[in-house]
Amino acid sequence: MNYNTIFWNQYLDGDNEALAKLYPELFEPFVLKAIYYTKNPEAARDIVSSLFVYLLEQPIHLRKERWEEHTNFEFLLLAIVKNKCLDYLKIEGNRERIKSSISEYSIENETVNVDLIHHLHQCVQMLKKEEKELIELHLKGFSNQEISSELNLNEKTVRNKLSLSRKAIFKIWARITILIVLLWI
């Protein structure tokens, strides 16, 4: 029986110092194996480090229950590292797909967004002067209280007039949309 196996058995019996003795022997070879899978040295080091943290955090009563039957603990730990690497690759792949789809969506919809903003501004221009002034201040980010101070109106009046102005924009938007649809037919 080699020293590593003795230290592993001591760890299973509850001696965390024994795991600390295994750490320098196993860390670098495990990191190299993780780099083989992940192609990312930083991620590989994180994966192996998290394995040892996980081992330290295991309750003593579960250690033997989970790992005593394994005759080759190094193979067991390498299998855990491999699985963690595969999980990492899966997560990274998902992240890349999400980033790519967001990027494609942004590029595809940039023209649509510009058109929608242009149509919104056209709708605002069709409002009555007071409605237009309220909406423009609102779109610039002014709060209802700031708008009420600016226009010398009660804050509740501003809320009500903004609500009515929004409804007017929706009506104008609906009319424009109908006209666009009729033009395309």
Image: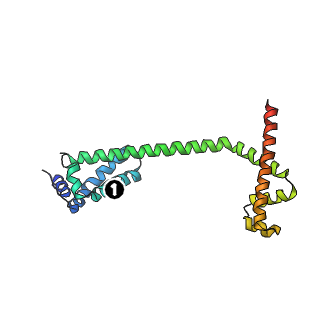
**Which residue shows up at 34% across the image and 44% down it?**
83
Q: Quadrant of the C terminus?
A: top right
Is residue 57 or residue 96 the one in the foreground?
A: 57
**Residue 42 placement (x, y as % from top left):** 41, 53
Display coloring: rainbow
Where disc 1 sits, the SS reads helix
Q: Is residue 110 left or right of residue 4?
A: right
Disc 1: CA contacts within 10 A as few (<14), some (14-19) or many (>=20):
some
Figure quadrant of residue 22: bottom left
- Residue extending farthest to the left is 1
Is residue 60 or residue 153 the one in the foreground?
A: 153
Type of the residue with mark 1: Ser
Q: How many marks?
A: 1
Q: Which residue is mark 1?
A: 49
Q: Is residue 127 left or right of residue 144?
A: right
**Which residue shows up at 29% across the image and 59% down it?**
57
**Residue 73 placement (x, y as % from top left):** 22, 48
**Which residue shows up at 56% across the image and 43% down it?**
100
**Which residue shows up at 36% across the image and 44% down it?**
36
**Residue 141 placement (x, y as % from top left):** 72, 61
From the viewer's perspective, is residue 112 above or below residue 166? above
**Residue 134 placement (x, y as % from top left):** 80, 60
Q: Is residue 56 left or right of residue 71?
A: right
Figure quadrant of residue 159: bottom right
- Residue extending farthest to the right is 129
